[in-house]
């Protein structure tokens, strides 16, 4: 089975947009709750990445949760995946 790039791009564009009044972390939690990948801040976030972000955020203390939640989406995903790989608990 071969998937053409144009088919994939069409599928990504057809994903409904989320409400803009939600914070980045709330949008990530919506992705986990609905089991549906979506775009956040121009970044396509899949279920796996969203679950890792939520797990890492919940494991942090309050001060670090605030810092983590204030990161842009691309940086938040990078930090979460790096921490998950580093500890080997999530990945």
Image: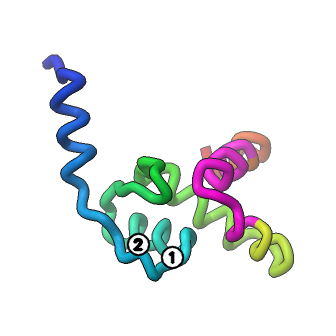
Q: Which mark is residue 30?
A: 2
The answer to whether the residues at label 1 and label 2 have Cβ atoms under 8 Å apart is yes
Residue 36 picture location, percent across and down: 31, 59
Question: With 87 as the anchor, is 6 left or right in this view?
Answer: left
Q: Tell me the magenta residue range.
A: 68-82
Q: How far is the residue under mark 1 from the one under mark 2? A: 6 Å
Residue 71: in magenta span:
yes
Tell me the quarter of the picture where residue 31 sits: bottom left
Residue under label 1: 26
Q: Residue at x 60, y 48 (%)?
A: 74
Q: Residue at x 42, y 66 (%)?
A: 32
Residue 50 picture location, percent across and down: 50, 58
Image label count: 2
Up/down of 39 relative to 85, above or below: below
Mark 2 crowd level (few <14, some 14–19, many ≥20, 10 Å Cα): some
Q: Which mark is residue 80?
A: none
In terms of secondary structure, what is the magenta stretch mainly? helix
């Amino acid at each position: 089975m071969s998937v053409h790039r144009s088919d994939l791009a069409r599928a990504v564009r057809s994903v409904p947009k989320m409400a803009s009044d939600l914070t980045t972390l709330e949008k990530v939690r919506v992705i986990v709750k609905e089991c549906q990948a979506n775009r956040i801040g121009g970044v396509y976030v899949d279920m796996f990445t969203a679950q890792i972000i939520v797990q890492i955020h919940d494991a942090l203390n309050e001060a670090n949760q605030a810092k983590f939640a204030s990161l842009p989406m691309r940086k938040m995903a990078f930090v979460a995946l790096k921490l998950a790989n580093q500890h080997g608990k999530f990945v």
